[in-house]
C-alpha cells in the first residue's frame, strides 16, 4: 500500500519535533553557551551601539614643535575643532608619552627643528604623529584626518611655489613629482605597544 503525502509530512514533522526538543535540551545543559548567547544578543549589542562613536570630535592633541616657525604654526593651526583640539605642549619625549599613557591626549604631533628650512629649500620633510588606538575606530579617524591635513598643506605649498616659479597662478594639467611633507603615523594599541606594520616612534 502506497504511503500518502500527508503521512510522509506528518512523519517528517514528528522527526523535526524530536530533533528540535533534543537540541534545546542539549543547549540547556551548556550553561556557558547560554550565557554567551544572552550576552551576544543583549549587552554586546547595547554596548556597541552606545559606546562606539563613528565621529572624531575634538581629539586631544599634544604638540612638540621643535621648529617654532611660522610654517609649523600654520600647520598646527589646521588641527582645530571639530576634529582636533590642541590640549597642550610637550618639551620632552617622555613628557609626551606620559600624557598618552595617562589618557590626557589621544595624539602627539612632533615637528622637527628644520621644518620651515626644508620647506623653503623645497626639500622633503617629515612630521610624525603618534596616535593612541586603544579605541581603534577613533584612532583610524585621527590618522586619516591628520594625513589629509598635512597632505593638503604640503600641496598648497607646492602649488604656491609652482605658481611663483611660473610668474603667476598655474593653469592646465599639473604633475607634482613628490609631496613636500610626508606624515609618519605611529599607531599604538593598549599600553601603547607599537602595532605591527607601523613605524616605531622616535618619542620612546
Image (spheres, rainbow, N blue to C red):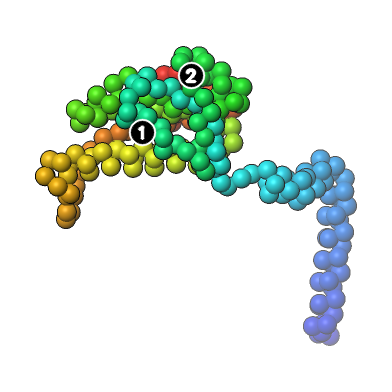
Tag shown at residue 48:
none
Q: In the image, what residue occupies the spot 59% across and 26% down?
A: 104
Q: Quadrant of the N terminus?
A: bottom right
Within the image, what quadrant is residue 76 found in?
top left
Q: Secondary structure at mark 1?
A: helix
Q: Earlier in the sequence, mark 2 or mark 1?
A: 1
* Residue 93 picture location, percent across and down: 47, 16
Give SS at disc 2: loop
For this rendering, which residue is in front, 151 or 52? 151
State how many labels appear: 2
Asked where in the image residue 151 lies, by quadrant, the reply is top left
Residue linked to disc 2: 90
Residue 22 visible in rendering: yes
Which residue is rendered at x = 22% and y = 43% of the image?
Answer: 159
Question: Residue, x 51% and y 41% (percent of image)?
Answer: 81
User: Crowding at label 1, few (<14), some or many (≥20) Cα neighbours within 10 Å?
Assistant: few
Residue 179 appears left or right of 105: left
Rendered view: 111 above or below 172: above
> Looking at the image, is 176 positioned above or below residue 183?
below
Residue 73 lies, in percent from the top left, at 37, 29
Q: Position of residue 154 (x, y in %)?
A: 29, 38
Cα–Cα span, label 2 and label 1: 18 Å
Lateral position of residue 60 relative to residue 20, left or right: left
On residue 74, which mark appears?
1
User: Is the Cβ of the residue at disc 2 closer than 8 Å to that at disc 1?
Assistant: no
Residue 132 in sight here? no
Label 2 neighbour load within 10 Å: few <14, some 14-19, many 20+ = some
Residue 112 shown left or right of residue 20 in the figure: left
Task: Please state the horizontal and vertical placement of residue 61, each as a whole percent of the image.
Answer: 50, 30
Which dot, 2 or 1, sits closer to the camera?
1
For image coordinates 34% across by 21% down, the residue present is 67
Q: Nearer the viewer, residue 194 or 10?
A: 194
Amino acid at each position: 500500500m502506497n504511503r500518502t503525502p500527508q503521512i510522509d509530512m506528518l512523519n517528517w514533522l514528528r522527526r523535526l519535533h524530536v530533533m528540535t526538543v533534543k537540541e534545546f535540551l542539549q543547549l540547556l545543559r551548556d550553561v556557558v553557551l547560554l550565557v554567551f548567547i544572552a550576552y551576544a544578543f543583549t549587552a554586546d549589542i547595547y554596548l556597541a551601539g552606545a559606546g562606539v562613536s563613528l565621529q572624531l570630535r575634538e581629539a586631544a592633541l599634544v604638540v612638540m614643535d621643535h621648529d617654532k616657525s611660522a610654517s609649523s604654526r600654520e600647520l598646527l593651526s589646521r588641527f582645530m575643532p571639530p576634529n582636533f583640539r590642541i590640549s597642550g605642549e610637550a618639551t620632552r619625549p617622555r613628557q609626551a608619552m606620559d600624557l598618552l599613557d595617562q589618557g590626557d591626549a589621544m595624539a602627539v604631533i612632533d615637528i622637527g627643528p628644520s621644518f620651515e628650512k626644508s620647506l623653503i629649500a623645497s626639500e622633503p620633510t617629515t612630521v610624525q604623529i603618534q596616535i593612541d588606538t586603544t579605541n581603534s575606530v577613533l584612532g583610524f579617524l585621527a590618522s586619516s584626518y591628520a594625513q589629509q591635513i598635512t597632505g593638503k598643506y604640503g600641496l598648497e605649498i607646492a602649488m604656491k611655489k609652482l605658481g611663483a616659479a611660473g610668474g603667476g597662478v598655474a593653469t592646465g594639467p599639473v604633475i607634482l613629482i613628490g609631496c613636500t611633507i610626508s606624515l609618519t603615523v605611529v599607531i599604538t594599541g593598549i599600553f601603547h605597544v607599537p602595532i605591527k606594520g607601523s613605524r616605531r616612534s622616535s618619542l620612546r
